[in-house]
Amino acid sequence: MAWILLGAAVVLLVLWVAYRMAFYSPVGEQNDPYRILPNGDYQARREEMLRLIAALEARPCERVSVTSHDGLRLTGRYYHHADGAPLDIAFHGYRGHALRDFCGGSCISFQLGHNLLLVDQRAHGESEGHTITFGAKESRDCLDWVNWANARFGSPDIALFGVSMGAATVLLATALDLPENVRCAVADSPYSRAEDIIGTVGRDMGLPGAPVILLARCAARVFGGFRLGDASPLDAVRRAKVPVLLFHGEADRLVPCAMSGVLQENCASAVRRYTYPNAGHGLSYLVDREGYTAAVVDFLAQCGERESS
């Protein structure tokens, strides 16, 4: 009996460590928007990103909040341009920050005269929660924000934007029962499934993919209270109810560019995909601002969104 208890304790300890590494987020950990990742792709554009972050942080905004479907207080930054203008709702990436992840992409919303909501995802920024679920619960948060916007603004045209895990979040939301005024989803650097990206990262670290995925599944279930398999943009886009625009850097060393290709091939709704040869993870806009912006503007026009004056 003692050996059984010891074995169970060891298993739980391993799962706890895995949960802490992959899914747990301490309060305040992601509160610095100026923390640029140390790898070469980001360091090469460090000064450009810092200028854009500072400019976005300096813009006047209203701090807003909503209560999630499971009782968490979620926060965001709302930038108002004009009453009745289209609303862009943007979701940042894994352990990211809205001001950093959308320091570039937000320029498109401002250029078009849209209102903009930058969300602090659960377990990030000033939002409550300690567990990052790779989109499984965040996609429901997305619907909560849409409902909040409709209650406050009276059903404006809404476009959902996301980068990395935020891209997975909005793609997962495309399969939900979204209000009719949600026109489309724009996903930059999405992974096909949470299990796929966790396995990829594990293999990049020299670990066997299958055991890493199994460990992550168990840790998510036991300590995170969610099913990792529910974080599958691939399954969601097969039931997508709104048009989808995909962006991906071909030099992405974190989320393989091929993953968005699989999503494109399986998307049930109208879909477009643009890739950029020299762009790292989430950096396509900075590599080709003009082309990226033109792609978004044309896509929104095709989806029936209007520019604001």
Image (cartoon, grey):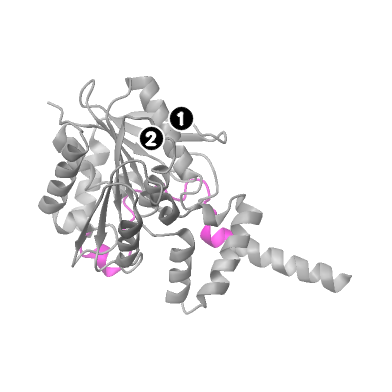
Q: Which residue is mark 2?
A: 76
* Image quarter of the C terminus: top left
Percent across and percent down for residue 289 are 14, 52
Check disc 1 and give the amino acid type: Val
At mark 2, the secondary structure is: strand
Label ID, residue 241:
none
CA–CA distance in space, label 1 to label 2: 9 Å
Q: Residues within 10 Å of mark 1 (few under 14, many from 20)?
A: some
Report the amino acid beneath label 2.
Gly
Give the residues drawn in magenta, as a range.
19-45
Q: Is residue 189 visible?
A: no
Label 2 crowd (10 A; few <14 / some 14-19 / many >=20): many
For the point 66% across and 55% down, the residue is 222
| Cβ–Cβ under 8 Å for marks 1 and 2 | yes
- The quarter of the displayed image where residue 113 is located: top left
Element type where label 1 sits in the image: strand
Where residue 190 sits in the image (x, y, percent)?
A: 35, 56
Q: Is residue 75 above or below residue 244?
A: above
Q: Is residue 115 magenta?
A: no
User: In which quadrant of the rendered image does the N terminus lie?
Assistant: bottom right
Asked if residue 247 can be seen in this view, the reply is yes
Residue located 48% across and 53% down the image: 231
Give the residue pinned by disc 1. 66
For the point 84% across and 73% down, which residue is it? Answer: 3
Q: Position of residue 207 (x, y in %)?
A: 51, 77
Q: Position of residue 141 (x, y in %)?
A: 46, 38
In the rendered image, residue 22 lying in the magenta stretch gets the answer: yes
Q: Residue at x 60, y 67 (%)?
A: 215
Is residue 26 shown left or right of residue 46?
A: right
Q: Quadrant of residue 261?
A: bottom left
